[in-house]
Amino acid sequence: MNAHNIKDVTPIPQGLDADVAIDFLKSLDANGWHNLVSIRYRGNPETKDIRGKTFPAGKWDEIRAWILAQDRDANLYYSLNEPKPGSRDDKLGKADIAAIRAVAGDVDPHPENTASYDDARGVVIERMAGLHVGDLPPTFIVDSGGGAQPIWMLDEKVAASGLVADVENIGRAVARAIGGDAVQDISRILRLPGTINHPSMQKLARGQMKRATSVLHRSDRRHSLSMLAAVYAPLEGGPMVDMSPLVAEITAELECADLYTVPPALRTRFSEAKLRHPKLNLLWQGNPEGLIGEDNSSSGWRFSLAARLGEAEFTATDYAHMALDWEIAQLDRSGIDPDAPGGLRQLARDWARGGHPRTSAFRAARWFEEPSEPLFPDEPTQLARSTEAAPIRWINPEEWRDKPIPPREWEVPNFIPRFEVSALYGDGGIGKTLLIHQYAICATAGVPWIGQEVRQARVMCFFCEDSEDELQRRHADILSALTLDFSATSDRLRLASRRFMDNVLATWDRQSGRMQRLAVWDQLREAALNFRADVVIIDTLADVFGGEEQNRIQATAFIKACLGRLAQEIGGSVIVLAHPSLSGQSSGQGTSGSTAWNNSVRSRLYLRYPKGAAKGDFRELEGMKANYGPKGGLLKLRWNRGAFDVIAGTVPGSVPRTAFPNLDHAADQAVVAALLDSPGARHSTARNSPYFAPRALKRQAPEILATLTEAEIAEALSRLERRRLIRLEGVRRDGSRREVEGYVVLLDNLSGETAGAAETASIFT
């Protein structure tokens, strides 16, 4: 169906069609796992019966049977993103998602702004038609039977680990751009085409009718995450912003709750809480003495209720129940109607603003952040304090007068320090696991790694994302590329495949807010001590970190008290692999989440494609941080027969290395080779010209200059001009007999080394 007739579609319910549902799921992901959810309204007031089922790849007959077995009045949903294999049979959460398949929006009708509900639906469908002429047409548009859900499929699935915040930030931008609801949560479920939308009683009262869920538009368009981010610039929000991750998480929690009936157990707990908290009791009776602050508006009363409940250790769902059941004159419930647009989000904002900061878990997480002013001016701030601390040893520097200065030790000089935690960042699929596996082999075999001398070491690799078969294949490929055999590593290397296992090393206690190292950490520590490991490699950070990625306190504690403690215990080094955020990729810094990740490690390397390339055999490895050495090492690498070769680079300081061309010299050679390969080509020094020399040369000799950026080419041209090895001059005349300028190589001035390189080709080919 195209954009011109999409608005004319009015689905008529014909009953459940499992073939349509399965066809859609195959289009979504023919080779992946699927999670389906059935939600049935029952009783009056309405309550929800929620059932879920997770299916392995290709189990289409089982999926069909499950769909047909559901209650005829049930609403059926599917998980947009792929669940982890073996996930439970239930509605899943973020921790259950293995891969991102798509980004979606959800636009509901607003009958209060139109003459009827059907007119409001028409506005939504018309808006969907407009997406087809936009910058990024969706792959599917689903008529949910109420509103519409545009879906942008990715050109390939990407691992969810490390990208949750980025993908959800893109989802927020989509919601804002199309005027939709918050559906950025990666575990979000959407209406399954081929099934029937059975409205709740409240929705029926607003004019919504039972309708079929169907696919309005289908195309073969697929998109990359970077393209989605370019069109829908990721929106990041603080904890008090409507579209923030916290509000989105709370909203998702409330969507799964039955908010129409207060559970008896909650009523009992609430009655007991009123006895323990007199201010809560006053507030519940409508007495202003129970308020926090001076705000006597409806929102002020809701804020106070959320805050009082937070103090009493209730949850967001508890607050929503009690707020909707609250019978006082000061409360305007129209703004928190769960079936009204924005109703659930308002309840979620109330809790994020008032309740969440009052819980003990939140307060304990901030135990060492003494605020400049009280969080709540009318009451003193209570901060949890650590009761255990290591004794402080004070050093008198005079003790060092005659003591020899210990030399700095490195695993890889000026790249990876010894006895510290270092990080290697890289996009998914870029090859960072291959690169670090190659390091492990080189370190244990005592041979150079990508041109760098390494300290021979005993190495253990804790791989969380690869099977044992994959480890064996990669190991054999690296040995072959390095012309080594299995005996080269002797008994100095150990590998562990932890795919699909629980690999979290530490979590945070909900009550105390303190980090707790888990049994996996103890096992890893014991194994490393028994093996006498010098280096422990962990792949990846997202698999072993059990906290909130953007929480600065947790990030610092994890690096220092978990990974750093491991390095201290074994008397060696820890190297952790991680994924950069989309903003970290676009900035070129390769960072992710909180700045604490970068600040806490002592060394950080970033593996990436050369600027302007998104695939191919070339990579760049840059030293982005080096606390104990000069920053700025840059190596140009090439994938070759299962491993990486170094082809050129700049290494900071006086670093022992095997012979490879200096990057500047190699760039000069490549530019000379490119100029000789493109005689008579037009060039300009004006940046806004289509013939700007660095850009034009990349087009004219793409293979020769494949691994060089425009900036590196510009620097090479400048160096060559200063040395009078090239010159910008007239090279020919165009059709109008006007002189065309271009760079020419002054062969007589070239040294034998440069000329020799020019006669052959670039070292980058």
Image (spheres, helix red, strand yellow):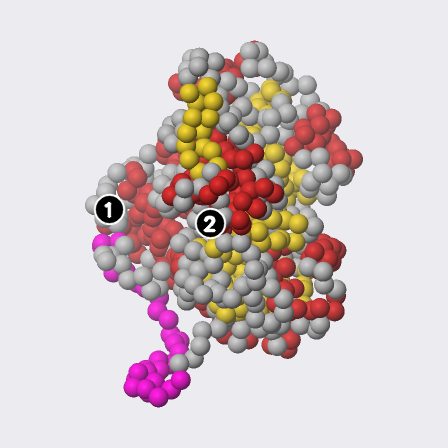
Quadrant of the image occupied by residue 272 = bottom left
Location of residue 415 in the rendering, given as x and y in whole percent from the top left corner: 49, 62
Residue type, mark 1 in image:
Pro
Question: Which quadrant of the figure has residue 312?
Answer: bottom left
Task: Give the residues in magenta.
Answer: 376-404
Magenta span: chief secondary structure: loop
307 and 720: which is toward the camera: 720
Residue under pointer 1: 288
In the displayed structure, 115 sits above or below 693; it is: above
2 or 1: mark nearer the eye: 2
x, y percent for residue 47: 55, 38
For residue 685, above or below residue 350: above
| 535 left or right of 477 in image | left
**Is residue 401 in view from this perspective?**
yes
Residue 538 horizontal/vertical position (percent)? 58, 61
The type of residue carrying mark 2 is Asp
Q: Is residue 672 above or below residue 387?
A: above
Question: Which secondary structure lies at badge 1?
Answer: helix
Residue under the point 38% across and 76% down? 389
Q: Which mark is residue 369?
A: none
Most foreground residue, 330 or 61: 61
Q: Secondary structure at mark 2?
A: helix
Which mark identifies residue 664?
2
Q: Residue at horizontal 56%, vertical 46%?
A: 757
